[in-house]
Image (spheres, coloured by chain):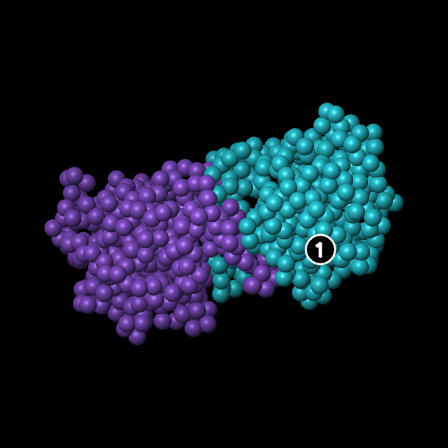
Chain colours: A cyan, B purple
């Protein structure tokens, strides 16, 4: 399988994050993408591809142009304003309740960079560094180049996106995500083919951004398996009664899962999601692939094992549709490469054996 | 002048806060109220009063009952869920953009306590501790007892509220504020008298919560002098074109001021605000009194001096209306007591001379 990788993610060199008000060691680190890359390169079945540069149009097809502009300007503006840290996190975030009952125009984007960040941010843990914008744009290029490979005839291709994307909404970044790589890819497929597109999101967390972006769209099906948001991030969306609205009614399927979900229970849930996708017209599936479902993941509370990822990949490929597979989360760096390799080999119908060095 | 004080604020013993993603020493500390109290008690012109307990009804008259319930339950629930810190700050905050275009019901309140906090919070710097709820309820009782004194015939009375209140919106806490003491007091006055009430907010920061609560109310005038929100917290509201809507059109006056605002410029702005209040019917003014406008304040960027607070108090009293004066911010602990004493003596038409121990 060909996989797309850009070294520009290395400039997004996150070392800490602020969770529950406390600055702690980061989970979404550069080593994540590096270990996947080296594990795949050690397997002769994989070939690395350099992403082609795509312009901003596919981004603004799903995102507010103001979000793109903010992310492009944020770090330079922070430096110009004398921001005191080597990362930018907001001071306050525009909670919907802060301006409830007031016109939408009441919610302003301040000039001061930390206030401005709070206009666009969901949390204080998604830092903006000097290299963040270039990395986020490169991740979009990785996703779009993966789309190009699949639309060009590949049965499946993998985009090693970092930073991830599925928490980013139309006008909001957060959850370690800046641009929604999967949503941008799905929209690009929809526009190129004129057909329905399905998104299968198997990251541990609900892809609130993807759901919001396609909430009223009937031509983009979103299916997500995830930790129940009543107990896990992102908390605000992902309940199972969220089915979409308008043209999108019925085109959103959330399958929230309990703590401790194991291989067997997960495969049963996956089959349910795949059955929905099998019923959907269209030949392309965008996969938001996360490995924070892994039993050893430091964030997640599921109990999946490496072999089940191979089976997940196999069953997803058995849909008979073409696969645009994009990396989302997964924070057990030690086994991340092997987990990705297992899934991707499964998606190609190849056997999987754990590598000795793994 | 009689002033109302409760020692319950001491249980809200904030030592740190998370600003821009970093945990730093707190500004809104217990010593603030203690130094004001001791400075006033050293002046024979002041007499301390214990607050009377008021029920929850005056709170839910301006706040979402869900906010009251959350604040009441939050700490015990955090303990029950094994929250890892001795304070509760949210992991993520429900940015309005996260569910833009989706029904209001899509924004959920999770069971997990840090997710639940993010439903109600504006920022990560407003911690909930074991004693926070009792302190916040006591601050409301302080405010309502101050109202009782004024409605009972006092020309002016002072409520030494801590925590402060003016950033708290109908369904949101933040900016070191939990319940909006001034809004609760103004609503209590409006209900008791049936007359118009004016709120004069002279805290350094815009009282976004007060503005939002009374946005569509014509019987409660909100006048605020504050740092321009384009450069200073709370960033999201406080621009001068915000005039209110519906019945409230014209009943909101924002006077945003530039960095470096000095005594002279401030008094000119105050006169503008007081002129608007003079035109308003009703005999009672609720003052949101902050001293973060002080030149030495660690947060503010104005240049006011202690003597001007005496003049501000004098001019406010010269309206000829009765004053419910409630403490908001002000973080230069060393001079905070003298600044309060100067303002309050001014409001009584008494001369002010800095105390030697000040």
Q: Is residue A95 left or right of residue B211?
A: right
Image point (63%, 34%), residue name: A332
Image point (38%, 46%), residue name: B129
- The quarter of the picture where the C terminus of chain A appears is top right
**Measured from the top left, where is residue B326 in percent x and y?**
28, 56
**Measured from the top left, where is residue B238 in percent x and y?**
43, 56
The answer to whether residue B315 of the structure is visible from this angle is: no
Question: Residue pushed farthest right?
Answer: A153
Q: In this view, does B105 lie above or below B90?
A: below
User: On the image, which quarter does residue B334 sit in?
Assistant: top left
Q: Nearer the viewer, residue A295 or B117?
A: A295
Dot 1 falls on which chain?
A
- The quarter of the picture where the N terminus of chain A appears is top right
**Measured from the top left, where is residue A241 in percent x and y?**
63, 61
Q: Is mark 1 on a helix, strand or loop?
A: strand
**Measured from the top left, where is residue B314 in percent x and y?**
21, 57
Q: Name the residue under label 1.
A: A222
Image point (48%, 50%), residue name: B113
Q: Is residue A267 left or right of residue B174?
A: right
Q: In this view, does A60 lie above or below B241?
A: above
Question: Residue pushed farthest top?
Answer: A357
Q: In this view, does B297 lie to the left or right of A112?
A: left
Mark 1 is surrounded, within 10 Å at the Cα level, by few (under 14), some (14 to 19) or many (20 or more) other residues, namely: many
Image point (58%, 52%), residue name: A229
User: On the image, which quarter does residue B154 sit in?
Assistant: bottom left
The answer to whether residue B161 of the structure is visible from this angle is: yes
Q: Which of B267 and B312 is in front in this view?
A: B312
Q: In this view, does A123 lie to the left or right of A180?
A: left
């Amino acid at each position: 399988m060909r996989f797309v990788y850009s070294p520009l993610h290395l400039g997004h060199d996150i070392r800490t994050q602020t969770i529950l008000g406390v600055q702690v060691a980061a989970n979404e680190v550069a080593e994540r993408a590096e270990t996947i890359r080296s594990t795949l390169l050690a397997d002769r079945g994989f070939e690395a591809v350099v992403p082609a540069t795509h312009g901003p149009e596919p981004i603004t097809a799903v995102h507010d142009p103001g979000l793109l502009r903010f992310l492009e300007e944020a770090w330079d503006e922070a430096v110009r304003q004398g921001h005191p840290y080597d990362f930018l996190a907001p001071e306050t975030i525009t909670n919907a309740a802060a301006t409830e009952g007031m016109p939408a125009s009441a919610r302003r984007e301040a000039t001061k960079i930390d206030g401005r960040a709070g206009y666009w941010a969901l949390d204080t843990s998604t830092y903006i560094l000097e290299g963040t914008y270039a990395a986020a744009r490169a991740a979009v290029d990785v996703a779009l180049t993966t789309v190009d490979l699949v639309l060009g005839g590949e049965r499946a291709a993998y985009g090693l996106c970092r930073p991830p994307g599925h928490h980013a909404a139309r006008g909001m970044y957060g959850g370690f995500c800046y641009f929604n790589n999967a949503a941008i890819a799905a929209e690009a497929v929809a526009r190129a083919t004129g057909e329905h597109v399905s998104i299968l999101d198997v990251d541990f967390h609900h892809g609130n951004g993807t759901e919001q972006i396609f909430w009223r769209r009937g031509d983009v099906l979103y299916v997500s398996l995830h930790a129940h948001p009543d107990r896990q991030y992102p908390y605000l969306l992902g309940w199972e009664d969220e089915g979409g609205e308008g043209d999108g009614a019925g085109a959103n399927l959330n399958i929230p899962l309990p703590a401790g979900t194991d291989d067997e229970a997960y495969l049963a849930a996956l089959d349910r999601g795949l059955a929905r996708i099998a019923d959907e017209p269209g030949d392309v599936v965008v996969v938001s692939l996360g490995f924070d479902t892994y039993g050893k993941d430091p964030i997640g509370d599921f109990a999946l094992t490496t072999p089940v990822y191979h089976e997940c990949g196999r069953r997803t490929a058995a849909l008979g549709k073409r696969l645009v597979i994009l990396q989302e989360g997964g924070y057990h760096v030690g086994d991340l490469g092997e987990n990705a390799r297992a899934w991707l080999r499964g998606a190609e119908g190849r056997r999987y054996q754990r590598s000795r060095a793994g």
